């Protein structure tokens, strides 16, 4: 089975996007924020936007490697959390640092799982 870190193209973009939406959904539900456009805009647009901008800069989707994936994950999520904090008028204190740590761990797990599932689906489609 190919590595989920080497997933390319639309499968990879879709897997990463779904994983970030799942991260936001879990966060919104676990903090009783309810699911709505404002919550998704606050979380998905900032973190997903950071991810996609860094992915573009690293070439993650054109020539995927584990290094590009991990660089995109760390820098993209960190940038997204920073933009989110600024947009919400929050200081970079212990609370934001805690959110960053949770976001980094969660998105790493969710994107890796989503990419593994996408790899399996892509392989099945290719052999069908």
Image (cartoon, rainbow, N blue to C red):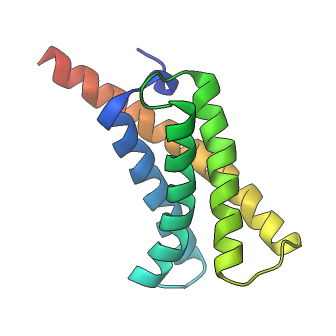
For this orientation, the residue located farthest to the left is: 128
Q: Is residue 30 above or below residue 22?
A: below
Residue at x-position 70% and y-position 76%:
86
Q: Is residue 13 above or below residue 48?
A: above
Residue at x-position 26% and y-position 20%:
123
For this orientation, the residue located farthest to the front is: 57
Residue 1 in the image: state x and y as whole percent. Answer: 41, 14
Residue 16 in the image: state x and y as whole percent. Answer: 44, 45
Whether residue 36 is visible, yes or no, is: no
Residue at x-position 59% and y-position 23%:
66
| Image quadrant where residue 87 sits | bottom right
| Image quadrant where residue 109 sits | top right
Q: Is residue 124 above or below residue 104?
A: above
Whether residue 4 is visible, yes or no, is: yes
Residue 28 in the image: state x and y as whole percent. Answer: 53, 76
| Left or right: 127, with 91 as reference point | left
Q: How many marks?
A: 0
Residue 21 in the image: state x and y as whole percent. Answer: 44, 60
| Left or right: 103, with 64 as reference point | right
Residue at x-position 68% and y-position 51%:
104
Quarter of the image with the C terminus is top left
Residue closest to the eye, 9 or 26: 9
């Amino acid at each position: 089975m190919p590595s989920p870190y080497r997933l390319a193209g639309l499968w990879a973009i879709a897997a990463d996007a779904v994983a970030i939406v799942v991260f936001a959904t879990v966060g919104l539900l676990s903090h009783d924020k309810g699911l709505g456009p404002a919550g998704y805009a606050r979380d998905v647009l900032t973190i997903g936007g950071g991810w996609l901008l860094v992915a573009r800069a690293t070439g993650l989707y054109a020539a995927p490697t584990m290094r590009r994936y991990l660089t995109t994950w760390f820098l993209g999520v960190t940038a997204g959390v920073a933009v989110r904090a600024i947009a919400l008028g929050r200081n970079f204190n212990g609370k934001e640092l805690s959110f960053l740590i949770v976001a980094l761990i969660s998105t790493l797990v969710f994107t890796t799982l989503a990419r593994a599932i996408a790899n399996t689906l892509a392989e099945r489609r290719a052999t069908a």
